[in-house]
Image (cartoon, rainbow, N blue to C red):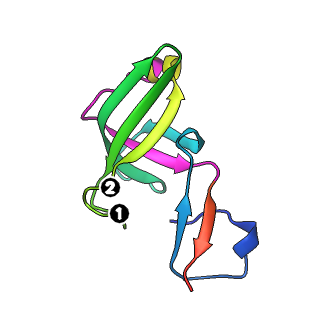
Amino acid sequence: MRLNSPEHRDVQDTKAFAYVRPHDLEVSRYTPGQQGGIVAQLTRAIVVVSTARLELQAQDCQGFDQDTILEAQLPAQHYRDQGFQEGGTLVLTPRKAKVFVAG
C-alpha cells in the first residue's frame, strides 16, 4: 500500500508500518477489482447515538496477523445511509497516518 508521507518522501521500497486513528479511516463498500485500500470484513458494529464503531478483519491478511482487529469510527448516520452490515466486505482507506520506516 502507498501512503502519502512527506517526511519519508526519499524512501522507496522499504518496509514500514503506520498508525491510523479509527476516525482517520475512510470506509466504503468493496467492489471486485477495486484497487487501493485495505479490504476487510465487518465483524462487529456498535452504533451509539451519533457514532458507529466498527471492528473489521483484513481479508487475505494483507500484511496483518490473522487475528488482528482493525477499528474504524464514523458518523452513525453515514453508517446507516451506506447500509453497512456485519459480514459485509468493506474497504478502509487511511486519510491520515503516522508512518514509521523500518531500520
On residue 47, the disc is none
* Spatial CA span between label 2 and label 1: 6 Å
Is residue 44 or residue 58 the one in the foreground? Answer: 44
Left/right placement of residue 13 relative to residue 58 reads: right
Magenta region, residue range: 81-96
Asked if the magenta segment contains residue 95, the reply would be yes
The relative height of residue 81 versus residue 98 in the rendered view (above or below) is: above
Q: Of the residues shown, which amino acid type is indicated by label 2?
A: Thr
- The reply to whether residue 79 is visible in this rendering is yes
Q: Residue at x 44, y 17 (%)?
A: 48
Left/right placement of residue 84 relative to residue 8 reads: left
What residue did someone put label 1 on? 64
- Quick check: marks 2 and 1 in contact, CB under 8 Å? yes
What residue did someone put label 2 on? 68
Helix, strand, or loop for circle 1? loop
Left/right placement of residue 62 relative to residue 92 reads: left
Is residue 20 or residue 30 the one in the foreground? Answer: 20
- Residue 64's x, y, as percent? 35, 63
Q: Residue at x 55, y 58 (%)?
A: 19
Asked if the magenta segment contains residue 55, the reply would be no
Left/right placement of residue 102 relative to residue 41 reads: right
Is residue 54 or residue 59 the one in the foreground? Answer: 54
- The C terminus: image quadrant: bottom right
Q: Of the residues shown, which amino acid type is indicated by label 1?
A: Phe
